[in-house]
Image (spheres, grey):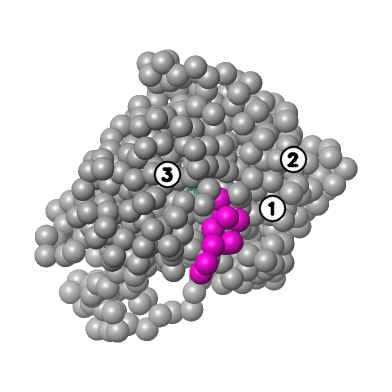
């Protein structure tokens, strides 16, 4: 036997993995249940001999077949971003032709000609935070919903979110005595976006943000930790207690909420066409299933929640040529499909060429070093060890400043106090990204930053006095006094695509005349307009929850009233 499937078939039969008659469901639900029934669940499979347990990661409870593909060469999904060396059974198996290659227009047309094989009220495209929030809201409004996800696992970029979700007027802020106002949230987002944002969308985001956190909590999330993000005047970025990353936690919460509400989530199912009726209202979609081929599914409402295009090299090269060679913090799923699908049927685009560089992606990697690290207290220095900007400025300014330094990279420097506060930093250590010294002088020697000791000593004085004489940083929660001391190399990389499908405040997609496209809704990073020229940290997850819910509710209403 030369692959996992034939090995199992030899032991038993094809039916040991597949249902009888042989019919592979798109989500491989049956097949994965079969894996676990023989091998045990992920916790049981954890192997202490391994450097890390691949079964407990921020990917959550993904399908076994995401890595151990039966008929195909096995591959670690994690290695889309990391470089783990791990032996996989049947590593010598040949890779088959990728199922998710170019969209086949003939097959799409045949599926449309054949007519729908299934009818629902609302189709949601993309199972990140916006998609899950839309699907759950539509289902709660009484609609029959199906949520299609092209990847073998749900979560998209949302699953990678690190820092948190912004909200104003929450009990968490009140408990900490933080004064905040909807007007301040609005003004910070507009200022951060260089006043290019659509103010109507920003107003809704600000007004509904506390409701978004409350809604996530009602679904089981913990949002009890608070910190400040760049460009925000107060602490309004909410995250799980203990400083764990926000994305995996939210996505896990939403996955469970979808299961509890019996929502039909299908992975390995890529939408390749939005089909319109003669009157241009939505008729449904064509889905390309990994195993079931091309089929049309009918619905009166479609919600696009396909995320951004931060991993689509061609689109970056076309819309933002100056960033084409940059690394990206994004999941491989961020390929801009929704923009192509919507454009093809006449949707209008807003700010489509505005792409955000995040200043602190681990140098020569795709791993984001969260803004939280600066928010909680780290300083940022150049290769000589000198500070060069207020660490809490907006991302566009911080990225530009780094690119003006020698060698176009910087270091974040912090001490044990920060590590004790932020669980995620242990993850960077685990990935071998941190340099460590028992004294600041030792760290300076290891990293070659000769001026670091003086910089640290000056910063400690500013911190004690509560006034940053060098760069006017107005929030300095920690000094640099508790060994060991740490440094991580960072450089700017593609992080967020601000532009996308044009929408109104009800999440209706707009056409080139700015009219609503009947039955077509969109939410999350696939849309444009909300963040203007530069998104503030914590506002994207807020966007996905606030506008995901609006899109889901309005999609259900549209379909049920038709
Ligand atoms: P996604 O979460 O990307 O989901 C889109 C889904 O659609 C994907 O699963 C994709 O596979 C699927 N899809 C795409 N095309 C198709 C198709 N044709 N058919 C079917 N499915 C399709 N923002 C914050 O506010 N706070 C943070 O702390 C934060 N940290 C971040 C950290 C990282 C490393 C990254 C990359 C981003 C971070 N962001 C953060 C930004 C934020 O995570 C994203 O903007 C947001 O999660 C996008 O959510 P979404 O639901 O719109 O898209
Ligand atoms: O909003 C974001 O993208 C964010 C907070 C990222 C991060 O650095 O953690």
Disc sitting over residue 520 in the figure:
none
State which tag comes first along the sequence, 2 or 1.
2
> Can residue 400 be found in the magenta stretch?
yes
Q: Residues within 10 Å of mark 1 (few under 14, many from 20)?
A: many
The x, y position of residue 318, in whole percent, is: 72, 66
The x, y position of residue 211, in whole percent, is: 51, 22
Q: Nearer the viewer, mark 3 or mark 1?
A: 3
Q: Mark 1 = which residue?
A: 354
Q: CA distance from mark 3 to mark 1?
A: 24 Å
State which tag comes first along the sequence, 3 or 1.
1
> In screen coordinates, is 382 left or right of 12?
right
Is label 2 in a helix, a strand or a loop?
A: loop
Quadrant of res 62: bottom left
In the rendered view, would you say 407 is above or below 556?
below
Between 162 and 456, the one nearer to me in the picture = 456
Question: Magenta segment, which residues?
Answer: 398-407
Q: Mark 2 = which residue?
A: 196
Q: CA distance from mark 2 to mark 1?
A: 11 Å
The x, y position of residue 92, in whole percent, is: 29, 84
Q: Residues within 10 Å of mark 3 (few under 14, many from 20)?
A: many
Quadrant of res 270: bottom right
Is label 1 in a helix, a strand or a loop?
A: loop
Q: Nearer the viewer, mark 2 or mark 3?
A: 3
Q: Mark 3 = which residue?
A: 374
């Amino acid at each position: 036997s030369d692959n996992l499937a034939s090995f199992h078939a030899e032991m038993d039969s094809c039916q040991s993995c597949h249902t009888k008659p042989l019919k592979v469901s798109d989500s491989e639900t049956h097949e994965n249940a079969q894996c676990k029934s023989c091998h045990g669940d992920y916790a049981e499979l954890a192997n202490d001999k391994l450097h890390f347990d691949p079964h407990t990661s921020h990917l959550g409870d993904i399908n076994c077949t995401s890595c151990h593909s039966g008929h195909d060469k096995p591959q670690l999904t994690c290695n889309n971003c990391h470089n783990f060396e791990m032996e996989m059974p049947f590593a010598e198996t040949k890779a088959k032709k990728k199922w998710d290659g170019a969209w086949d227009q003939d097959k799409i047309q045949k599926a449309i000609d054949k007519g729908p094989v299934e009818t629902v009220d609302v189709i949601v495209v993309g199972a990140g935070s916006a998609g899950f929030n839309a699907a759950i809201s539509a289902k709660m409004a009484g609609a029959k919903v199906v949520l299609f996800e092209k990847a073998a696992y749900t979560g998209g970029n949302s699953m990678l979110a690190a820092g948190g979700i912004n909200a104003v007027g929450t009990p968490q802020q009140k408990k900490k005595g933080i004064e905040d106002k909807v007007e301040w949230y609005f003004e910070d987002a507009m200022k951060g976006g260089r006043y290019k944002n659509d103010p109507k969308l920003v107003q809704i985001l600000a007004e509904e943000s506390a409701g978004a956190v409350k809604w996530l909590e009602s679904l089981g999330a913990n949002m009890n930790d608070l910190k400040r993000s760049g460009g925000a005047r107060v602490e309004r970025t909410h995250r799980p207690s203990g400083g764990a990353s926000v994305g995996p936690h939210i996505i896990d919460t939403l996955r469970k909420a979808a299961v509890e509400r019996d929502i039909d989530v299908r992975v390995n199912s890529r939408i390749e066409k939005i089909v319109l009726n003669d009157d241009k209202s939505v008729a449904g979609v064509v889905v390309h299933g990994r195993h079931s081929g091309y089929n049309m599914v009918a619905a009166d409402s479609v919600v696009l929640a396909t995320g951004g295009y931060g991993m689509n090299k061609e689109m970056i090269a076309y819309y933002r040529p100056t960033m084409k060679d940059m690394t990206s913090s994004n999941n491989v799923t961020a390929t801009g499909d929704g923009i192509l699908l919507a454009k093809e049927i006449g949707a209008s685009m807003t700010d489509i060429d505005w792409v955000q560089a995040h200043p602190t992606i681990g140098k020569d990697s795709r791993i984001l070093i969260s803004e939280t690290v600066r928010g909680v207290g780290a300083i940022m220095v150049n290769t000589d060890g000198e500070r060069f900007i207020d660490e809490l400025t907006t991302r566009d300014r911080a990225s530009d400043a780094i690119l003006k330094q020698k060698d176009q990279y910087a270091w974040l420097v912090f001490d044990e106090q920060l590590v004790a506060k932020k669980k995620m930093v242990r993850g960077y250590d685990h990935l071998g990204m941190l340099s460590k010294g028992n004294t600041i002088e030792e760290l300076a020697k290891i990293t070659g930053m000769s001026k670091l000791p003086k910089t640290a000593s000056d910063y400690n004085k500013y911190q004690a006095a509560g006034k940053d004489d060098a760069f006017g940083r107005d929030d300095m929660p920690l000094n640099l006094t508790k060994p060991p001391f740490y440094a991580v190399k960072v450089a700017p990389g593609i992080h967020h695509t601000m532009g996308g499908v044009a929408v109104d405040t009800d999440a209706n997609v707009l056409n080139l005349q700015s009219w609503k496209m009947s039955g077509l809704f969109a939410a999350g990073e696939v849309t444009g307009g909300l963040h203007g020229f530069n998104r503030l940290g914590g506002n994207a997850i807020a966007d996905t929850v606030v506008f995901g819910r609006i899109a889901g509710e309005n999609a259900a209403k549209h379909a049920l009233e038709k």
